[in-house]
Image (spheres, rainbow, N blue to C red):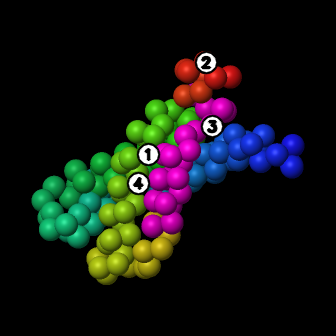
Amino acid sequence: MWRDPEKRRDLGLLVVRIGLGLTFLFIHGGPKLLGGPERWARVGGAMQVFGIDFAPTFWGLVAALSEAVGGGLLLLLGLFFPWALIFPTLTLLVAALGHLTGLIPGGPWYPLELAIVFIALMLTGPGRYSLDARRAGNR
């Protein structure tokens, strides 16, 4: 098994999906989602990077949902790949731009690195141990 990386590929994808999915569900997106309108408005304020200063509560809710559902639950389950990762990837890129412009404190590297991982997952797919594979009959 250890000499043939192809045999480990699906297991590696499962580990990445579980790790990142749980993180986005319980550390990133979940708390934002449960934070309510005040937190959503703070998060949605990042859209000012694009000159969008209306409806920050709406944009914050969209970001929280994209992280909790797309980057969390659907990533964890390996369901609706690669579509499930589009919105969390965009959310991460907005966060990186917010950090670069100084709108959000801190450096841009963490959200940028996660966006790169999400793009790589979109390209590779969820692997054999996923609900997408079950739906396709690739058990």
Give the amino acid type for the residue marked by disc 3 in the picture.
Gly
Give the alpha-carbon distance from disc 1 to disc 4, as whole Å: 6 Å
Give the alpha-carbon distance from disc 1 to disc 2, as whole Å: 22 Å
Mark 3 is surrounded, within 10 Å at the Cα level, by few (under 14), some (14 to 19) or many (20 or more) other residues, namely many
Answer with mark 1 or mark 3, whichever residue precedes in sequence. Answer: 1
Q: Which residue is mark 3?
A: 127
Q: Estimate the x, y position of residue 30 in percent, counting from the top left.
A: 46, 49
Q: Predominant secondary structure in magenta?
A: helix
The magenta stretch is 112-131
Q: Residue at x 87, y 43 (%)?
A: 1
Give the amino acid type for the residue marked by disc 2 in the picture.
Gly
Tell me, yes or no, whether the two marked residues, 1 and 4, touch with CB atoms within 8 Å: yes
Q: Which residue is mark 4?
A: 89
Tell me, yes or no, whether the two marked residues, 1 and 2, touch with CB atoms within 8 Å: no
Q: Estimate the x, y position of residue 37 in percent, counting from the top left.
A: 27, 53
Secondary structure under tag 1 reads helix
Q: Estimate the x, y position of residue 101 in percent, counting from the top left.
A: 29, 79
Mark 4 is surrounded, within 10 Å at the Cα level, by few (under 14), some (14 to 19) or many (20 or more) other residues, namely many
Secondary structure under tag 2 reads loop
Q: Residue 39 lies in magenta, yes or no?
A: no
Give the alpha-carbon distance from disc 1 to disc 3, as whole Å: 15 Å
Mark 1 is surrounded, within 10 Å at the Cα level, by few (under 14), some (14 to 19) or many (20 or more) other residues, namely many
Mark 2 is surrounded, within 10 Å at the Cα level, by few (under 14), some (14 to 19) or many (20 or more) other residues, namely few
Q: Is residue 36 visible?
A: no
State which mark lies toward you, 1 or 2: 2
Tell me, yes or no, whether the two marked residues, 3 and 2, touch with CB atoms within 8 Å: no
Give the alpha-carbon distance from disc 3 to disc 4, as whole Å: 19 Å
Of residue 118 and residue 6, the one placed in the foreground of this image is 6
